[in-house]
Image (cartoon, rainbow, N blue to C red):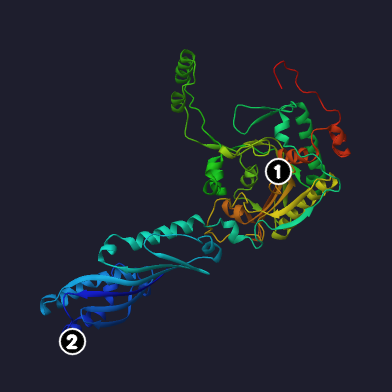
Amino acid sequence: MRFELEGRIIFSKDVSEETQKDIIEVLENGDIFLKGVPEGKENEASKIEGYKFEGKDLKLNMTSGTYTRAHEGIVRLKKPIMEKVGRKHQIGIRDVAIDTYVVTITATPSKVAELKGLKVPECEVELDGEKIKILFKNLGDGELKRNIIDRAIKFVKTELDKQEQDLTFEVCKIAPGTIVSDYKAKREITFDKDPTELAEPYGWVKRFPGRGQWFYTAPMAKLFRAFESLIVEECIEKVGFDECLFPKLIPLDVMYKMRYLEGLPEGMYYVCPPKREPEMFRDFVNEMMIKKEIPIDKLKTLLRDPGYVLAPAQCEPFYTFFDHELVDVDNPSKFFDKSGWTYRWEGGGAKGLDRVNEFLRGECVWMGSPEFVEKVRDDTLKYAEKLAEKLDLEYWTEVGDDPFYLEGRKNEDRGIEFPDVPKYEMRLWLPHVKDERKGVAVTSANIHGTHFVEGFGIKDYKDRKVWTGCTGYGLSRWLIGFLAQYGYNYEDWPEIIQKKVGKLPEIPKLITWP
C-alpha cells in the first residue's frame, strides 16, 4: 500500500521565523517515524516530502508505505514539536487537519474490477487498472481519533478478500470455463423432461432418509452396471490401468497431507470411532428404549474424537500407497478403483440425482514423469469423449475452475510445480434446463503437478521429476446425462446400451409405491 497526504498542523498563533527554525529541526529528524518499524523496512515509514509555513498553519506533504503510515506520522509530529517550541515560544497546537489523503492498494485487474460500484462511508473509491484508490478529504483530529481511515481501509480490503480467487485462477494458463471441444448430437433430441422427476414415479429409485442419498432399484442398477462396464472397456482399459481396491475410510492425517482439510473441510463426512465401553452403551440403549427416541447427547459422550473421513475424492489411498517411497518414473503406476461409494457433504446443494452426497464412479490415478502424466490425462479424456460420441450424447469439454486439490485454497507456499491446465471437465447436455445451456459434469481429468508428491514425500530414485494425475468417471452423472437426452424408454436407447443392459428387470411390486 502507498499513502499520500496533504495536511496541516494548526498552531494557536502565527508561527514566527524563530519558532519555524526550531520546528524545522524536528521535521528533519527522520527517526521520529522509525519507532516500531522492523529492520530493513525503514523505507516504508513516513517521509516528509515538503513543508511550508503560512500564518498559523504548517502545511505538510507526506508519503509512506505500510509502516508509520502518513496519517499516523502527522499525528506523531505533535509531541516532539510541542516539546521543542511549546514553552520556549509560548505556542500551542490547536488541531491536525488532513486536506487530502490518498491510500492506494494494488491487486490484479480482475480483482479490482470486481469492486466496481463499491461505496465506502466518508471517503471515495476510484478503480484504475491494478489500483484501488481510497480518497479522504477534510479530516480533522476528531476523525483521526475515531480511526475512520483505518476502518475504511479494512472495509475495502475485506471486500477485496471476498473477491479473491482460488489458487486455480492463478495457476491455470487457460481461463477456467473456456470450452476446448464440443459435440452436437446427430439425432434430434426430443426428450426434455427432468430425469429426476420421473425416476421415482417410474419406480427406478426411491428416496432414502439421508440427504443426497437414493435407493436405486433393479432397472437403474442394471443401467449403472452397463455404464460401468462400458467405461471400463471403452476408456479405462484402453489406457492400461490396473484395477485395485481402495479403502473408503480415510484417516484424517491423510487428508491433512493432501491439504484437503485446508481447501474444503466443510465438504466431508467425519467419522468418530466409538469407545469400547459396553456398560455405557447399555445405558444408552436403556434410555433409548424408555424414551423411544435416540439420546444424541449421551451418544456423543460415547464417541471418540473424529479420526477419519469417508472418502470424498476416492483417490486418497493412491498417494498413501506411495507415502515416502522411492519410485522409478520409467516404470510408472496406473491404478483404478470402482469398489464403492464416494461421499461429499453438499449440504443444501444436494439436489436431484445429479447432485448427491453418495455416488459411484470409476477413479483412475497415475504417477510418472510430467510428460507421461499429461499424456495419460489427455488419453482418459479423449476416450470419454469418444464414448459419448459413440452413444451420440451431446457434450462439451471445458477448462475446470475447481480442481479438487486446489478447491478453496488461496495460496501456495511450497514451490509446487503445477500444470498449465490443472483440470478439464466434460459435461453432458441437460435438455430439460431451458433458461441456459447447462450440462452435468461426467468426467473430471486432473493433473496435480508435484502437489501430492511433495505432500507425501514421494521421490524418484534418480531424483527426476514426479507428477501425479487422476480422472474420475462419474457413473451417477453419466446415467443422468444419458437419461436426460434419451429418456426412460428402452426402445429409444442406442443399441450399444441395449446390448449391455439386456432385458430390463421389473421394478419392485408394492401396494403403496411407487
Q: Which disc is residue 433 wearing?
A: 1
Task: Residue 211: name its quadrant.
Answer: top right
Quarter assignment of residue 15? bottom left
Q: Residue 448: give x, y in percent of width and height.
A: 64, 54
Location of residue 435 in the rendering, given as x and y in whole percent from the top left corner: 68, 47
The answer to whether residue 395 is visible is: yes
Query: Considering only vertical position in the picture, is 126 above or below 286?
Result: below
Q: Amino acid at mark 1?
A: Val
Q: CA distance from mark 2 to mark 1?
A: 80 Å
Q: Against 24, is 159 above or below?
A: above
The amino acid at mark 2 is Glu
Disc 2, SS: helix
| Mark 2 crowdedness (10 Å alpha carbons): few <14, some 14-19, many ≥20 | few
Q: Position of residue 126 (x, y in %)?
A: 46, 67
Q: Which residue is mark 2?
A: 17
Secondary element under disc 1, as helix, strand or loop, is loop
- Tell me if mark 1 has few (under 14), some (14-19) or many (20+) residues whose alpha carbon lies within 10 angstroms of its own: some
Viewed as shown, does residue 392 lie left or right of 464?
Answer: right
From the viewer's side, name the closer residue of 319 and 286: 286
